[in-house]
Image: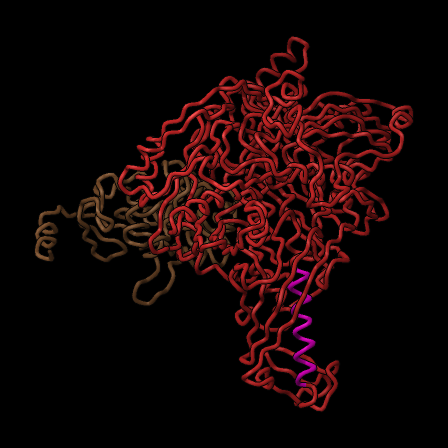
């Protein structure tokens, strides 16, 4: 059971609630700048071409145009991992690639000017499929990447960055197996998280080498570091992280828009804003990586996995920045959900001529498991094993080891999630509904119901570093310095809550700095589910340090030792003699107390999310309705109940569960164009189609920080898609392996099942 | 010079409407303070009048984020031309609280009490869509609330908490204007 706290675990009002409901929250586009220019991007209509000539003279002559930049006009700034992608290049590599940048006094003039730029292209053959791209005669995107294979590993995770899972003896493992399943499975519908607020940035360049950026990103301090590197380590960067209207990982890849604004400000000497249109957002920003797995798995009758071998092919689009990191984390996560001694799982990241994949909620693990679990299902079907029994048996247990993203071996010291899985199954009434593989749970006329389950967890909850300061003021208030933007998780409020609990100070008297990289200490940002443990630990440690200092400071005045003192509501008193007391003001009006906290990475804990789904398939129309979702998890200690509920309900959106039902990016592989780059043709779930969601949340103390809590925000989207394919397959009695389960695919599968084939 | 400007201003056609119960008169023209005939209401509210509480997501009538009230009815301000609003009354999120007491509308308070938002970008539109429903039907059933909000896009999935927030007001019958 969780402990009783004054603030932690209680529903408290979000610090920004009043601003949100009155429209006063300032997102990027709401900030006013004097003399602001507007930037627009001319984009390539071709998937692969060399720019022969660009004539920008007509655009430059249009009144109101202040700068037109092409690849010839800019410094040799490069992005990507490895750093081979020039910000504007002579070559374009996807439909939507940036060809020229325009700054003008209005958006409309900038848009018109883009239309006046004359570009002559030499068209090159393009490639859109990972396996085609790896063939010897395939079009080559970069001289530096022979065979279109992206250099594996990422410097961010060190020299041994995880690139594959290789251990034990797979041949021996397959000999020990009772059943072997084999095949190719994919999660390649490249769904788009589409946060409502588009990507954007405002830049103010200051000669000779400074830039101040206003950004929309979940991790604004990191932009300072990423952009420093894009700018060839020659530009000093300051970032202001504004309220972020959704990110779901994607806006971590904001370097293009930030670079465009910077280049245009540098060229004009004025502030420049670049905000992507929704079409650019969908067709020229970040997609999920495409995932295809050709693999073989051996299993014993009791669900023990004896061997996994194969190849994971990852389509990263026209370049990679974080994909190697996603592969590293995905390779770690697959071990968390599969306790297996023998592995030979290799990976390749491949460039193709479509817009880039990158950082998205689920970060590699969702993509891999959405391919891997359908394979496991083939083995489970052969031995008639209940998938809930499988995941309970196979999810990491205390003492198990795994290779994590840096290539090092870690021993898990966290909690056992079997009980959360069982409670979830009970809430879902799994036992009652499970009729075996490819069996519907019920049939009423043309309506067939089926159930499925998925699991996902991540040791990223303790990844990367965070720093914080907590300043105590003589007026009995505290200020947390933590470079955190609010992107929807409510974590800015939650860190305030943690500091309030340590200091026993009402939340109304604890404040948090704006996410300005100039004034705050280092903060990696809320990646993955690291917010609660990693960032929270730094805030807690800073508050504890500040508390210790103020008690030491006033102890002589109370004729007591610091350890005999308590502080509540800005008053310090002797624990055994509360009449002996002074206010924080006793520190003196001319003094503040500053505490420091830091978190260093810890990969020995992991979170876990299990998602159960029930669907109803109409066999006449092929439509799949999602009826019921149960998310089951254990968070150690709930910090904020409504905030947690929001994160768990998020399982549907941001290319989560619905990426298995109807969400997909429709890519025309003859022209390289995305055909549904608008919010009418890109389908999203409305209020009218909400399923029932039950969230089963346990609180088993975890050895993390003083509140024994861990985060689960990121992983809510990940188990659902694979559960949906399982549920639809069970409902219709035939395997469906392609995402999403559209009416067309369902009807095709049903037709094939009637003629005896497989889908 | 000043006299010339004045003459021009007299010549310019004007449109007038109420925004959050305050009269607004704008010239039609292409100067920064004027309204072009192509300007959407969303643009005018945000860029000309500085009322940035109205957010824009798709700018194409698909997502409901930019919803405001036009004579009490929910409209998409990105699909409404400003010149169409002559003589009409617009309420944006900034105008929902009581202008004299500053007291929040019961819906706004309920959104706070139920933490009916995550990133908050869709929230003004959600609140105004719900407000239009309650103006029309102070005690809707949950299915009617879902229908009224079905044009409002939210990617964080605040839907469940939004429904609770709206139903809490609906059940009190406090949605009457």
Q: Give the main secondary structure, helix, strand or loop, of the magenta stretch.
A: helix
Q: Nearer the viewer, residue A199 or A530?
A: A199
| Type of colouring | by chain
Locate residue A624, reporting x and y percent: 56, 27
Residue A1 shown in magenta: no
Locate residue B69, reporting x and y percent: 31, 48
Q: Which chain is red?
A: A
Residue found at the far top of this picture:
A755
- Asked where in the image residue A757 lies, by quadrant, the reply is top right
Q: State the hue of chain B.
A: brown
Q: Could you tell me how many numbered marks the image carries?
A: 0
Q: Nearer the viewer, residue A132 or A149?
A: A149
Relative height, residue A152 to residue B16 (above, below): above
A83 lies left or right of A178: left
Image quadrant holding the N terminus of chain A, namely bottom right
What residue is rendered at 77% in x and 58% in y? A703
Q: Nearer the viewer, residue A433 or A625?
A: A625
Q: Where are the magenta residues, as a range?
A: A536-554
Residue A544 shown in magenta: yes
A135 lies left or right of A510: right
Locate residue A706, reporting x and y percent: 72, 64
């Amino acid at each position: 059971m969780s402990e009783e706290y004054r603030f932690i675990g209680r529903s408290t009002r979000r610090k920004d609630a009043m601003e949100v409901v009155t429209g006063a929250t300032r997102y990027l586009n709401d900030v006013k700048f004097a003399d602001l220019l507007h930037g627009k991007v001319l984009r390539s209509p071709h998937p692969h071409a060399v720019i022969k000539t660009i004539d920008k003279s007509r655009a430059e002559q249009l009144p109101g145009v202040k700068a037109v930049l092409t690849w010839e006009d800019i410094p040799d700034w490069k992005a990507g991992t490895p750093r081979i992608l020039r910000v504007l290049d002579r070559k374009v590599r996807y439909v939507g690639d940036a060809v020229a940048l325009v700054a003008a006094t209005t958006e409309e003039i900038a848009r018109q000017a883009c239309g006046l730029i004359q570009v002559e292209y030499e068209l090159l053959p393009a490639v859109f499929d990972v396996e085609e791209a790896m063939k010897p005669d395939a079009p080559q995107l970069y001289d530096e990447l022979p065979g279109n294979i992206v250099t594996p590993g990422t410097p961010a995770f060190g020299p041994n960055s995880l690139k594959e899972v290789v251990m034990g003896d797979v041949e021996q493992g397959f000999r020990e197996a009772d059943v072997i399943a084999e095949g190719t499975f994919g999660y390649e519908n490249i769904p788009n998280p589409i946060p409502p607020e588009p990507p954007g940035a405002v830049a103010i360049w200051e000669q000779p080498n400074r830039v101040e950026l206003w950004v929309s990103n979940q991790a604004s301090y990191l932009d300072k570091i990423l952009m420093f590197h894009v700018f060839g380590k020659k530009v000093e960067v300051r970032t202001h992280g504004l309220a972020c209207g959704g990110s779901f990982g994607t806006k971590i890849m904001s370097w293009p828009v930030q670079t465009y604004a910077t280049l245009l400000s540098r060229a004009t000497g004025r502030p420049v804003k670049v905000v992507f249109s929704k079409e650019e957002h969908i067709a020229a920003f970040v997609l999920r990586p495409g995932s295809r797995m050709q693999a073989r798995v051996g299993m014993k009758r009791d669900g023990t996995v004896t061997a996994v071998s194969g190849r994971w092919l990852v389509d990263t689009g026209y370049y990679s920045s974080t994909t190697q990191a996603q592969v590293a984390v995905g390779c770690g996560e697959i071990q968390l959900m599969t306790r297996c001694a023998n592995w030979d799982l290799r990976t390749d990241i491949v460039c193709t001529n479509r817009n880039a994949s990158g950082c998205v909620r689920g970060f590699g693990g969702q993509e891999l498991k959405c391919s891997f679990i359908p394979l496991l299902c083939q083995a489970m079907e052969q031995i008639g094993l209940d998938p809930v029994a499988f995941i309970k048996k196979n999810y990491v247990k205390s003492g198990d080891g795994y290779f994590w993203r840096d290539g090092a071996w870690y021993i898990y010291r966290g909690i056992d999630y079997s009980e959360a899985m069982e409670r979830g199954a009970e809430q879902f009434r799994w036992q009652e509904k499970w009729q075996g593989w490819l069996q519907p749970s019920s049939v009423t006329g043309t309506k067939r119901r089926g159930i499925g389950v998925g699991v996902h967890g991540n040791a990223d909850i303790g990844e990367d570093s965070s720093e914080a300061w907590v300043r105590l003021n003589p007026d009995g208030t505290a200020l947390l310095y933590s470079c955190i933007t609010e992107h929807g998780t409510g974590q800015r409020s939650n860190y305030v809550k943690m500091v309030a609990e340590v200091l026993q100070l009402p939340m109304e008297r604890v404040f948090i700095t704006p996410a300005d990289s100039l004034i705050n200490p280092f903060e990696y940002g809320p990646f993955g589910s690291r917010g609660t443990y990693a960032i929270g630990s730094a805030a807690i440690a800073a508050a504890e340090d500040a508390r210790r200092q103020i008690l030491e400071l006033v102890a002589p005045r109370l004729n007591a030792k610091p350890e005999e003192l308590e502080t509540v509501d800005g008053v310090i008193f002797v624990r055994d003699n509360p009449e002996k007391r002074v206010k924080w003001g006793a520190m003196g009006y001319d003094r503040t107390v500053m505490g420091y906290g830091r978190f260093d990475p810890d990969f020995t804990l992991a979170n876990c999310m299990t998602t159960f789904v029930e669907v109803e398939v109409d066999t006449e129309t092929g439509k799949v309705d999602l009826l019921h979702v149960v998310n089951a998890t254990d968070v150690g200690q709930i910090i904020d109940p409504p905030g947690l509920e929001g994160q768990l309900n998020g399982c549907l959106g941001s290319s989560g569960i619905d990426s298995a039902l109807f969400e997909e990016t429709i890519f025309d592989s003859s022209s390289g164009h995305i055909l549904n780059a608008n919010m009418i043709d890109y389908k999203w779930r409305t209020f009218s189609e909400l399923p029932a969601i039950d969230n089963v949340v346990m609180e088993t103390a975890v050895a993390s920080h003083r509140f024994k809590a861990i985060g689960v925000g990121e992983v809510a989207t990940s188990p659902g898609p694979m559960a949906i394919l399982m549920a639809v397959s069970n409902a219709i009695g035939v395997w469906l392996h392609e995402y999403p389960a559209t009416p067309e695919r369902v009807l095709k599968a049903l037709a094939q099942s009637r003629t005896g084939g497989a889908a | 010079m000043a006299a010339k400007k004045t003459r021009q201003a007299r010549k310019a056609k004007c449109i007038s409407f109420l925004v959050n119960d305050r009269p607004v008169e704008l010239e039609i023209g292409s100067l920064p303070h004027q309204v072009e005939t192509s300007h959407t209401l969303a643009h005018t509210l945000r860029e000309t009048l500085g009322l940035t509480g109205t957010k824009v997501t798709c700018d194409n009538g698909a997502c409901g984020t930019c919803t405001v009230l036009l004579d009490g009815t929910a409209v998409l301000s990105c699909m409404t031309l400003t010149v169409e609003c002559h003589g009409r009354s617009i309420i944006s999120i900034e105008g929902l609280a009581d202008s004299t007491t500053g007291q929040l509308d019961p819906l706004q308070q309920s959104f706070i009490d139920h933490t009916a938002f995550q990133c908050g970008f869709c929230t003004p539109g959600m609140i105004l869509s719900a407000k239009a429903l309650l103006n029309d039907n102070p005690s809707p059933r949950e299915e009617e609330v879902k229908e009224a909000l079905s044009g409002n896009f939210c990617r964080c999935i605040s839907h469940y908490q939004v429904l609770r927030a709206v139903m809490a007001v609906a059940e009190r019958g406090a949605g009457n204007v």
